[in-house]
Amino acid sequence: MIERIATPSVTKKIIEQNEFYFKKNFGQNFLIDSNILQNIAECAGITKEDCVLEIGPGIGSLTQVLAEKAKKVIAIEIDKHLIPILQQTVGEYQNIEIRNQDILKTDIDEMIQKENNGKDIKIVANLPYYITTPIIMDLLENHRKVESITVMVQKEVAERMQAQFGSKDYGALSIAVQYYCEAKIDMIVPPSCFMPKPKVSSAVITLKLRKEPILKGIDEKLFFHIVKCAFGQRRKTLLNSLYNQSKLGLSKEALTEVIQFVGLDEKIRGEALSIQQFGDLTKQISLKLPVAYHKK
C-alpha cells in the first residue's frame, strides 16, 4: 500500500529529506489532514470518468487522493523544486501527469482539447491565496471547458464569492462568480490542518458552472464594466461611480434617467443591487450608448 502523504509526520519527513524550503511568494501551505482531502474529493464529485486539473499540487497530498478516484489528474506546479518531490511521492500512479508550469500562462483550452478530447474537466485545488481571484476569473471570463471548480481558498474570499446583495462581503467578485456559477461553501478548514499554519482560516468552495447564463440578452463586456465601476469606490453612489469612472460618455442627466427608469433611487450604492438589477441597468445603458461604443 502506498504511504499516505497527508499526515504531519510524513509531510515533515518529505520536507526534511528533500531539504525543501517554503516560499512565501508561492503561498505554500500543505494540507496534513487526510479527512479534509477525502472531503474535498467528495465535494468535487470525482469519478473514474473524470479528468481533473489540479493547480499547485505541492508535495502531492491532494494529488494522491484525486488519482485514486479520477480517470486522470493533470497536476500543474510552478515551483521547479517540487517536481522531483512529486515524482517521488506520486510517481507510482500511472494516471498522474506532472507539469512544471505557471497556470496563469498555461493554454488551458489547448490542454483540455489534448488531454480530455475537448470535454469539460473538473478543477480541484488547494489554491495559493495570491492567485485565487486571477485564476478563477480567467476560467470564468474566458468560458473554459470546465464542469466545476472545487477549491480551498481563504475563508474571507469564499464568503465574498457566495455573498448576496446588501451584505458587506458583496462585490464585483460575488457577481462575477454567481453570474457564471452556482456557488456553495462546503466546509471551513482551520489553520491547524496545514503545514506551515496560515494566519487565517480557509474554506472549500464548489463552483458549478451554469449551463445557461443567469442573464440573457445583455452585453457581457458592458455588464462587467458597469459592475466594476459600481464597486470601484464603495462609498460613492451608483450614479457618481458610473459618471466618474465608466468612460461611457453619458451625461449625469442621462445616467440619472436610466437609474430611475429601472426603478432605482439615484442615491443607491452598488452593493444594494442584485445581479438582475445590474442586468436591467446594463440593457438600458446599452440603448443610450452611441453605435461606435458597441464596435469597440
Image (cartoon, grey):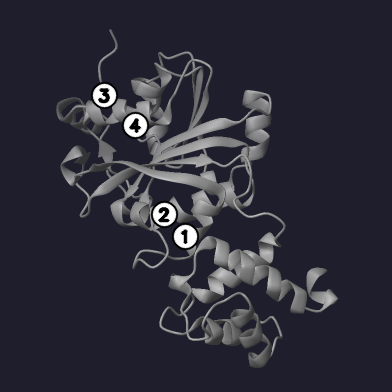
N-terminal label among 3 and 1 = 3
Labels 2 and 3 touching (C-beta < 8 A)? no
Q: How many marks?
A: 4
N-terminal label among 4 and 3 = 3
Q: Give the numbered dot on residue 161.
A: 2
Of 229 and 164, the residue lying toward us:
164
Amino acid at circle 2: Met
Label 3, label 1: how far apart the Cα atoms are: 34 Å
Q: Is residue 253 left or right of residue 80?
A: right
Quarter assignment of residue 261 = bottom right
**Where is residue 145 shown, x and y percent of the image?**
63, 37
Q: Which mark is nearer the camera, 3 or 1?
A: 1
Label 4, label 3: how far apart the Cα atoms are: 15 Å
Residue at position x 39%, y 34% from top?
57
**Where is residue 108 shown, x and y percent of the image?**
61, 39
Label 2, label 4: how far apart the Cα atoms are: 18 Å
**Residue denoted by label 1:** 173
**Where is residue 242 shown, x and y percent of the image?**
58, 81
Quarter assignment of residue 260 = bottom right
**Residue denoted by label 3:** 5
Residue 20 visible? The answer is no
